[in-house]
Amino acid sequence: MINSSVIKTYVRAAVLTTAVLITAAASLCGCSGKGESKLYIYNWTYYTPDSVIQKFENEFNVSVVYDEFAANEDMYAKIMAGGSGYDIVFPSGDYVSIMASQGMFEKIDASKLPNLANIDPLVLQRATYDPDMEHSVPYFWGAAGITVNTAHVPEFERDWTIFGRRDLQRRMTMLDDMREVMGDALVTLGYSVNSINPDEINAARDLINTSWKPNLVKFDAEAFGKGYANGDFWVVQGYPEVVYGEISGNQELMDSTVFFIPKIGGPAYIDSMCILKGSKNIDLAHEFINFIHRPEIYAEFCDTFRFPATVNVPARALLTETPIYNVEDLENTELKNDIGASLELYNSAWFNSIRVGE
């Protein structure tokens, strides 16, 4: 939860209604009546189960103050403004790179984190922004994909070209997320999601404008799950937990819903746990990070959202829910990197052409 993008960004996390309400209530009160010590966490909306927070509070006799953000940009701006007082923050990989280069993190003390041994080496290979976990510890590796209502769309190709189908015009949405949508188009054309070649970026822009955009209701980062649930949309690009959280009480719709990540790949993300510079609770922050990577705790986190246990290997054997997708489905995805000044090429394509008139 993508923002160098604006979705993973806007609601990477919609969950079961009960979990949402409980977590929101906990955020509002700022604690749960545990010990006097407090750990201040700044995380994506509804991205750590309330049950996990409560277990940590009980075991360590502390109170967790859990604050939420919806976009990397929002998180970064708030911390840059100063005075946040947070101990742990959960940026995506590109923002780990940006914030680490600006000296915004404490160093991770691996000697305090024996559960780092549970992290999949493949994830660390992909986390080129910090492969040795000097400033960050991976929390979740995932990707957006495509959700289809097979009651209305019984036959379809499992790739991004579904958005070029004129027969589904006005029944589809894609994310209001520049790097995600541009990344999908770049991959479809055989390029990297991190391309900085102006010709390739312009070709992706043209594919979106001429083939995909005419068929979309809109670029939607916030309401695509609700729109899918009420039948307005039949095909949506987005994060599956958002859609499945909205349709969880509708068994008929659950049975007709298919989610997939195209085999050709697309943009992916790794969200990580980082300790902010100046944290007053560094030891406790390390305890929380280590706690998250206990296999049974990580499995509980993943089961809540029906995530695959992408980061923690031993947790995979402990899952009790069938994940919406599998670790193997991420094989051909590519992390969105910090592309520096070349981001302006994307901004120009997105805001001056693709999003113009929206």
Image: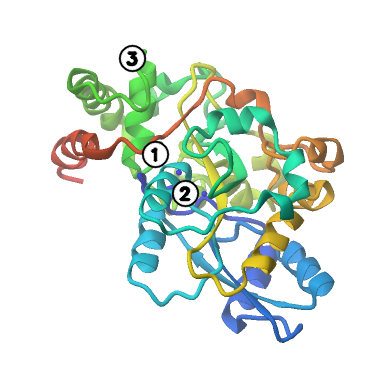
Residue 344 position (above or below residue 44): above
Q: Residue at x 39, y 27 (%)?
A: 184
Q: Judging from the image, what secondary structure is the residue with disc 2 in?
A: helix
Which residue has dot 3 on it?
189
Q: Nearer the viewer, mark 3 or mark 1?
A: 3
Residue type indicated by callout 2: Gly
Q: Residue at x 40, y 35 (%)?
A: 172
Which residue has dot 1 on it?
173
Disc number for residue 62: none
In the rendered structure, the answer to whether residue 354 lies left or right of residue 46 reads left
The first of marks 3 and 1 along the sequence is: 1
Percent position of residue 345, x then y:
19, 33
Residue type indicated by callout 1: Thr
Which residue has dot 2 on it?
227
Percent position of residue 230, x then y:
52, 50
- Local crowd at mark 1 within 10 Å, few (<14), some, or many (≥20)? many
**Looking at this view, is 233 or 287 the one in front?**
287
Q: Judging from the image, what secondary structure is the residue with disc 3 in?
A: loop
Q: Is residue 166 visible?
A: no
**Distance from Cα at disc 3 to Cα at disc 2:** 29 Å
Q: Nearer the viewer, mark 3 or mark 2?
A: 3
Q: Judging from the image, what secondary structure is the residue with disc 1 in?
A: strand
Percent position of residue 125, x then y:
58, 28
Percent position of residue 212, x then y:
31, 27
Residue 323 position (above or below residue 167): below
Task: Give yes or no for contact between labels 1 and 2 (Cβ–Cβ under 8 Å).
Answer: yes
- Local crowd at mark 3 within 10 Å, few (<14), some, or many (≥20)? few
Residue type indicated by callout 3: Leu
Q: Residue at x 45, y 44 (%)?
A: 2
Q: Nearer the viewer, mark 1 or mark 2?
A: 1
The first of marks 1 and 2 along the sequence is: 1
Q: Residue at x 52, y 59 (%)?
A: 106
